[in-house]
C-alpha cells in the first residue's frame, strides 16, 4: 500500500478480519494517542505509557466496531472521540483508587482508642541507631531552626521534635489545632524549599 492511507478501505479490511490493516490504522492514528497521552501526562503523574496505549487500542477497536457512515461523522473524528474517552477513563479509574487510598489513611495524631491517651505516633518505634543518620538528623534540625523566621513556628517545631501531639501543643501554646497544623505545613514547605 503506497501513498496516502484510505482509512475507509482499511476499516472495510479490518471488518473482514485483516490484522495487518488494523496495525496500519493504529499506526496511522498514533498522533492522536501521543497528543492525548501528552495531555494526560501533563496533569497527572501516573500516566503509565503501556496502560494508556492499551486504552488507545481499545478505543480504536471500539471506534472500528461502532462506526456508522450513515451518521455523517468523519471516521477520524470518531476515532479521536473513542480513543481519548477510553484513555481518560483509565485516568479516572486510577484517580478513584488514589482517592480511596488517601481517604483511608490514618493520622498519626489519632488516639489508639477512645479511652486511651496514647497516640498512634507513640506506638511507632524509633529503630534509627545509625550514628551517621543521627548526625544528619541533628544537622537538619539545626538548619531548620536557623531558616525559620517565625518564633511561633520555631516553638511548634521544637515541641513536635520533642514528641508533642497537636492537642498537647495547642494546649501549651494556647491556640487551636488548626493553627498548629498551619504552622507545621509552613515549616514543611520551608524545609522542602531548602532542597529545591
Image (cartoon, helix red, strand yellow):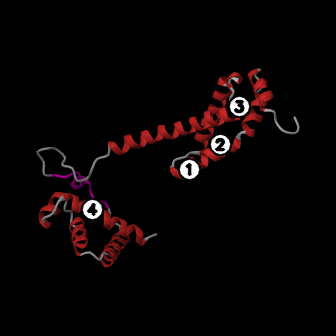
Q: In the rendered structure, which disc, 3 or 4, sits on the residue that comes first in sequence?
A: 3
Please provide the residue range marked out in magenta.
118-127
Query: Which residue does the image show at 37% across and 43% down from the upper left?
Result: 101
The image shows residue 145, relative to residue 180, as above or below, that is below
How far apart marks 1 and 2 lie (CA) works out to: 12 Å
How far apart marks 4 and 1 lie (CA) works out to: 31 Å
Q: Which of 173 and 88 lies nearest the eye of the viewer?
A: 88
Residue 65 x, y percent position in the rendering: 67, 23
Element at label 3: helix
Residue that mark 1 sits on: 41
Q: In the rendered structure, which disc, 4 or 1, sits on the residue that comes first in sequence?
A: 1
Q: Which of 50 and 64 lies nearest the eye of the viewer?
A: 64
Within the image, what quadrant is residue 51 found in? Answer: top right
Q: Which of 1 and 166 lies nearest the eye of the viewer?
A: 1
Residue 145 x, y percent position in the rendering: 29, 76
Give the label, 3 or 4, closer to the camera: 3
Magenta segment includes 119: yes
The image shows residue 10, relative to residue 163, as above or below, that is above
Query: Which residue does the image show at 25% across and 60% down from the upper left?
Result: 181
Query: Which residue does the image show at 34% across and 65% down from the upper left?
Result: 188
Q: Report whether 119 appears left or right of 71.
A: left
Residue that mark 2 sits on: 33
Q: In the rendered structure, which disc, 2 or 4, sits on the residue that comes first in sequence?
A: 2
Residue that mark 3 sits on: 75
The secondary structure that dominates the magenta segment is loop
Q: In the rendered structure, which disc, 3 or 1, sits on the residue that comes first in sequence?
A: 1
Q: Which of 45 and 86 lies nearest the eye of the viewer?
A: 86
Residue that mark 4 sits on: 182
The reply to whether callout 2 and callout 4 are in contact (CB within 8 Å) is: no
Amino acid at each position: 500500500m503506497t501513498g496516502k492511507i484510505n482509512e475507509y478501505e482499511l476499516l472495510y479490511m479490518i471488518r473482514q478480519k485483516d490484522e495487518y490493516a488494523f496495525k496500519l490504522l493504529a499506526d496511522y492514528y498514533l498522533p492522536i494517542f501521543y497528543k492525548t497521552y501528552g495531555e494526560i501526562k501533563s496533569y497527572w503523574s501516573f500516566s503509565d505509557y503501556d496502560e494508556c496505549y492499551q486504552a488507545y487500542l481499545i478505543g480504536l477497536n471500539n471506534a472500528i466496531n461502532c462506526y456508522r457512515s450513515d451518521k455523517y461523522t468523519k471516521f477520524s473524528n470518531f476515532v479521536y472521540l473513542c480513543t481519548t474517552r477510553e484513555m481518560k477513563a483509565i485516568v479516572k479509574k486510577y484517580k478513584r483508587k488514589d482517592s480511596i487510598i488517601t481517604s483511608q489513611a490514618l493520622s498519626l495524631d489519632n488516639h489508639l482508642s477512645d479511652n486511651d491517651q496514647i497516640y498512634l505516633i507513640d506506638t511507632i518505634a524509633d529503630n534509627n541507631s545509625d550514628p551517621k543518620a543521627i548526625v544528619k538528623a541533628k544537622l537538619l534540625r539545626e538548619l531548620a531552626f536557623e531558616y525559620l523566621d517565625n518564633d511561633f513556628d520555631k516553638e511548634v517545631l521544637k515541641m513536635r521534635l520533642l514528641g508533642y501531639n497537636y492537642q498537647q501543643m495547642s494546649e501549651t501554646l494556647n491556640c487551636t489545632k488548626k493553627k498548629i497544623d498551619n504552622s507545621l505545613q509552613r515549616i514543611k514547605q520551608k524545609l522542602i524549599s531548602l532542597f529545591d
